[in-house]
Structure formats: structure tokens, C-alpha cells
Amino acid sequence: MTIEFDAAVLRAPGEPLTVERVSLPSTPPPGEVLVRLGASGLCHSDLHALVGEWEVPSPMILGHEGAGTVERVGEGVTTLKEGDHVVLSWTPSCRRCRHCVGGRPVLCDMVSRHSANHLSFDGRSRVTSADGGDVYSFAGLGTFGQYALVPESAAIAVRRDAPFPQAALVGCAVTTGVGAAVNTAKVRPSDTVLVLGCGGVGLNAIQGARLVGARRIIAADVSDDKLEQARHFGATHVINNRGEDLAERISQLTDGRGVEVAIEAIGLPRTIEAAYAVLARGGTAVVAGQVADGVQISIDPFVMSDQELSLIGSNYGSSTPDSDFPLLIDHYLDGRIDLDSLVTRVIDLKDINEGFDQLKAGIGIRSVITY
């Protein structure tokens, strides 16, 4: 038997998403769970695929930032039960490879083989279109539809008192941003932190730096509205680098030393290079932003060795979703981080293209579909 539902499908890059009737099996395969989505956020990574900056197969249900309820569990599932509230992870882990057992599940071998190719762990798609053809699910999730069949490790149980729109954002922007500061950069209370880009990831990087008590948090963006949002989330200083020289202002704010940590949350060559260029001796630049296919940067390796600078990547905030998702929900419900202000618009699935138009225009922080 199958379940039929509406989903926003990418047919070709650069074209609007079409809401279509699709289906998937109502009985989960062994090791998988059927999740009824309650909410899904619109993320810039989805936009990369939508406009063709990332090459992805089609047809495809986009969306990878979601939360919902477990409706059924497959044979062998031990950590979840029907009725559990879950946040979906786009890095489901096999829990057996060297990365998983070594404490870095976001680098799981199974993810690179299957979820990164928008398939389930057995290398197949779970969704079927009205004409009987296979439909891919973005990152193996496809949260722009009300149902998803995912591996057990892709659904992380969280508290039932967390509202779905806010919980959904833990599935990407919150974990990626907070984790970039806390897990990847390992920000210390003595550090001055620069965050370049005040979208969903950047604002949460600011929250992460505030959470661990960073001495000074500097936010940089080209939008005064976004810089005002950055102040709300914990920035102590802001720089509009459309009208101000970033390097000069950083030098002024740090008495010429530079910043101990710079987190790039946009995904542009010039901002990655700028983050690296304003580091203090021994500083670390973290690339959390997602770039378009084929992008390269240029840095001076002599300066890297001479000043012991670090340039590192952050995938999903270097997180361990099994423990980090529930922890972030606790931080939210206990008032230590703000997820409510991240949700600036709640929309229906039929309004998804309008939501992406607003994302392109930089309007608001997160549009969230509720089902």
C-alpha cells in the first residue's frame, strides 16, 4: 500500500517548483521510519539547487530542514516509536564506519554514497510520481512534502513541547550556525568573533558565540536590517561592509590585532578570503557558507605558516545530531537561544515559490512551510 500526498517538485533548474501528487510506501522498509512532516524551512541550500548553482538529478522533492511525527517504524528500528516528535537530519549515519565510531557522524561513509546523491541507504528512491516514475528526495529527505521515509538515524527524537516550525530549523540553520561556533571553531570566552553574513546560519553562529560567552561578537553584512537582527541575536558590534572597509573596521575594533575566530556564513569567494585576511595571529577562519559548484579561493600560504593561521570547513556545524538536536531544543525551551525570532514567515506549500522569491531578495530570516 502507498500514501499519496502533495509535494513541491523540481523538474528543471531555474524553473518554479510545481506542486504535484506523489506517493511512497506506507510500510517502512527495515531500518527506516515513516515521518509525517509538521514543518519545513526554506534554506539557501535548496535555492542553490533550485537556480542551478548545484547540479542535482530531477525530478526531485527539495527540502532538508524539517520536523514532524513518526507514524510507523520498520523492522529493526530500536530508538524510535510511533508518536515520537523528531527533527530530521540530512546526515543520517550508519553508526559503524570509522567516522561514526570516531565521533564525526556528519562525515559518515554512507552519507557520501547515498544521501549526498539524494537516495536512501539502499541506493534507491522512495517516492513515485503520478506517472509511476522515480522521484529523488533532496539529501535523502525531501521535506517539501508532508511525508518522508528516512533511515532511523535521520530522525532524531526531541521533546514534544517544541513547536514544529522552530524545531524544523534545528535540522539545518541552527545546528550549522551554532555548531560552527561551538563545535568547529571552539570559541572561547576570551575570543573576539567575526561572523560574515547574517542569514539563518550567520545569526545562529552569533547565537553560538554568545552561548559560550565570547568577549566580542562582530557581525558583518550589507543589509542594515540584517545587522539590526544580528544585534538582537547577540552581536556586540556591526559592520555594513557595503559602505565600510571591513579590514579597517576590524583593525579599529581589535586595536590592530584582528579576530581570533572568523565564521563565513555566505558562501562567496571574496567573503571567505576576507574572513581569512582579518585573523589575528593563531586565528581560525571557518567556512560554514555553501558555495556554488566550481568555486575556488586564493590565500597566501606563507602567511598561513608564518602566523599559524587555520582555514577549516564546517559541515553541519561539526555536530553529532543524536545529542546536539535535543540539546539545542533544550537551549531554546530554556531561553538560552532564540528560535522564535528566526521564523519570520509561515506559509502554505502552495506559496513555496513566493517564499523562495523572498529568500532571493534577502527578505526576512526564515520562511517555514507548515503542513
Image (spheres, rainbow, N blue to C red):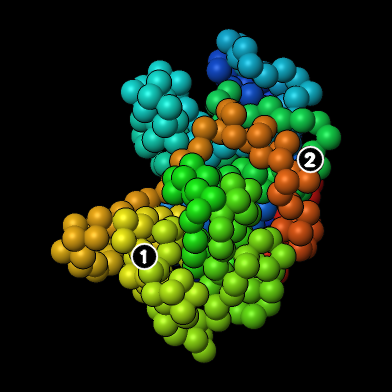
Residue on which the image places disc 2: 334
Q: Quadrant of residue 261?
A: bottom left
Q: Local crowd at mark 1 within 10 Å, few (<14), some, or many (≥20)? A: many
Q: Which mark is residue 279?
A: 1
Mark 2 surroundings within 10 Å by alpha-carbon count, few (fewer than 14), some (14 through 19), many (20 or more): few
Q: Nearer the viewer, residue 159 or 57?
A: 159
Of labels 2 and 1, the one closer to you: 1
Tell me if residue 126 can be seen. no
Q: Is residue 159 left or right of residue 256?
A: right
Identify the mark nearer the N-term, 2 or 1: 1
Left or right of residue 253: residue 82: right
Look at 44% across and 49% down and name the residue there. 185
Quarter-wise, where is residue 333 in the image? top right
Residue pushed farthest right?
161
In the rendered image, residue 13, in percent from the top left (x then y), is placed at 48, 64
Q: Residue at x 34, y 51 (%)?
A: 312
Could you say where residue 311 lies in the image, as x and y percent from the top left? 32, 55
